[in-house]
Image: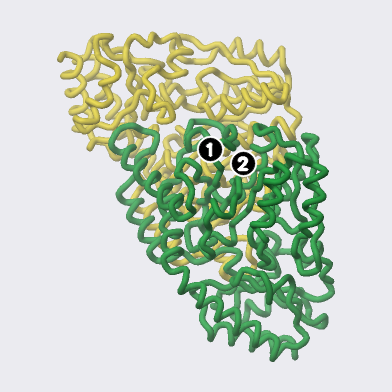
Chain colours: A yellow, B green
Amino acid sequence: MIYLDNAATTPMREEVIETMHSCMKDVYGNPSSIHQAGRKARVLVERARRIVSKKLNVSPSEIFFTSGGTEANNAILWGCYKDLGKKHFITSPLEHPAVLHSVESIARYHNAGVSLIDIDSKGHVDLEHLEFLLKENPGSVVSLMHANNEIGNLMPMNAVSKLCRQFDALFHSDMVQTMGKLHLDLQALDVDFAVASAHKFHGPKGAGLMFVRKGKSFRPWIMGGGQERNMRAGTENIYGIAGLAKALELAEDTMGMDQEHINNLRGMFLQLVKEKLPDVSFNGDAEGSALNTIVNLSLPEKINSEMLLPNLDIAGFCVSSGSACSSGSTTGSHVLTAMGVSDDRPSLRVSFSRFNTIEEVQNFVEVLRRLCHE
Amino acid sequence: MIYLDNAATTPMREEVIETMHSCMKDVYGNPSSIHQAGRKARVLVERARRIVSKKLNVSPSEIFFTSGGTEANNAILWGCYKDLGKKHFITSPLEHPAVLHSVESIARYHNAGVSLIDIDSKGHVDLEHLEFLLKENPGSVVSLMHANNEIGNLMPMNAVSKLCRQFDALFHSDMVQTMGKLHLDLQALDVDFAVASAHKFHGPKGAGLMFVRKGKSFRPWIMGGGQERNMRAGTENIYGIAGLAKALELAEDTMGMDQEHINNLRGMFLQLVKEKLPDVSFNGDAEGSALNTIVNLSLPEKINSEMLLPNLDIAGFCVSSGSACSSGSTTGSHVLTAMGVSDDRPSLRVSFSRFNTIEEVQNFVEVLRRLCHE
């Protein structure tokens, strides 16, 4: 089996599995308990928080662990509305459903406003339109993901954060695809909020984090005990948290090497596609400002889109038509639709990780070529 | 170290750790992906759902996995308000903060009503008062935990569910303390909603479930992808879910034996306390209708409450003054306060599991005796 769906989720790194395994054997206390069993668990959680905050160049007091990126996106957006008094949200039609559905729900049931930024045919946000929207709605919340999960496009973070500062807006960024792939200095990126999910960078599913800048905190979205300094109730997933920190630490350790390797895979893939599949086109800004792990393709119209993924699956290749959430459907993604990409041609998302090889990429292109010429 | 704080959290069973470890090595797909890696993860999740639903005598379609009991309590109570049109909540002052804070928040910010049922000095709800409240507010939501997490009192479930049916109320029960300790037939208990948390029955932290009776479902509280049949967004914590199911399966397998063992521990403990610590009293209905795992004590007034837990900790005993959430404070629990228990006397919660021994209980009473007579 050749796994090229790393934007959906990634295999855990062996060291992460072993870290979690040994924590499961050795540590079982509730971090809120003050006795020794509890303190041992507390040390695990706070050590993880220190590792993460150091890697992201923020204070440990600004990092809060969650069950994943989706929960974190919900908590931040609702928190902005409920507790920070924000009544207008500016986002893009290309965002993840965790952001779009939260914002839509706040708007529909709570009388907040939402503006969607225009995007161009390559999937980049129109910064002039963002400026216009901010001028019309000063003091908004801007929610824009760092790298798009379907097409890989990178957000021009500095330009966005500058505009946000200029118009007194809060800037939230879903960094689920970039955390652990790019080195993220959250001070330099100048965001107010960010979220990530461990399973996207070879960590465990069920563990994520939110960065909440000092002074921008809100009442807990999940209410109960006072965990996570009263920002997120519920007994901490100490194994998941330890795994998340280990995965981020490893990702940073091997980042240079991994980036080079993935750049090579991507370069080879783009080159082979152009050479061998001239009737295939790239969606998004594949050859411009995009995260190296994600490539989105439109295949020739004659390909039976319903049979494409099953045929690739039979041939041993795991890829997707878009985000995993909508894998079951062949009705095209909201991202490609918003970009004006015709759904007459089946689309494919190919996403790499450090564990893929040049041979896998070559084999994949060969199989695609056969399917396109059958 | 002798761990007598099993109501806060429990050590994982070895078989649960090994199940999770092997899943982490073998399964990494996203259950929403339709390719073979995804299907393998989907099988893991659905097998877990089948195991759990069979043990609880409900349909797999009525079980939804969450990050824990707290999240599940939040989701259900908000869902009742948002989507099921419920505008009045009836609960007890002895509930867990996950229920109390959710209901208070719905009431304060969304103009719903809340009634608190009177309780007696033993911590049992006044069923006549519940009936009165239901009469005054037909069509309410009643939220009452199966066993109290601080004093162990058991709820008279059948009487409550009968009253709920009579007055067209929905019945939600936090079963965090009883799941995996008592055999729970959710049909027979006749609840509309229930929640549990794996780490309370020797499963992993970060995994829980909600039972939502067919026809009583609501829009997802965590919004995003359509996971958990659109009831709970976010990539599934597949390792946690597999661990939860394994832990529940094991708990049911050894339940008879474990109950007998814990009954013996409890019996010995109560007897020794009465014999050797005549100035110690039990809070709640310790010798009546209570879960066998939890005993709550008030110690003599002369004991320095601030030094009690640290002294026990130094002696190697992990116990708590109440729930883990409030372990750091010595200002007394909301449960004991609501019951009218004086906070002049320090309180202790002792909670057993299958892993405790008669010797541990004997040693603990001996240490308590020394502390009381120093």
The mark nearer the N terminus, 1 or 2, is 2
In three-dimensional space, the C-alpha distance between marks 1 and 2, rounded to whole angstroms, equals 9 Å
Q: Position of residue B206 (x, y in %)?
A: 52, 52
Q: Residue B11: tell me if it is visible.
A: yes
Tag 1 residue: B232
Counting from the top left corner in percent of width and height, residue A224 is at: 68, 50
Q: Which label is found at residue A248?
A: none
Which corner quadrant of the image does residue A110 belong to?
top right
Residue A277 versus residue B219: which sits nearer the camera? Answer: B219
Q: Which type of secondary structure does the marked residue at label 1 adopt? A: loop
Give how far across and how far down residue B234 sits, in percent: 50, 37
Q: Chain of mark 1?
A: B
At a point 54% along the width and 41% down the height, the residue shown is: A56
> Mark 2 is on which residue type?
Ala
Q: Amino acid at mark 1?
A: Arg
Disc 1, disc 2: CB below 8 Å? yes
Disc assigned to residue B75: 2
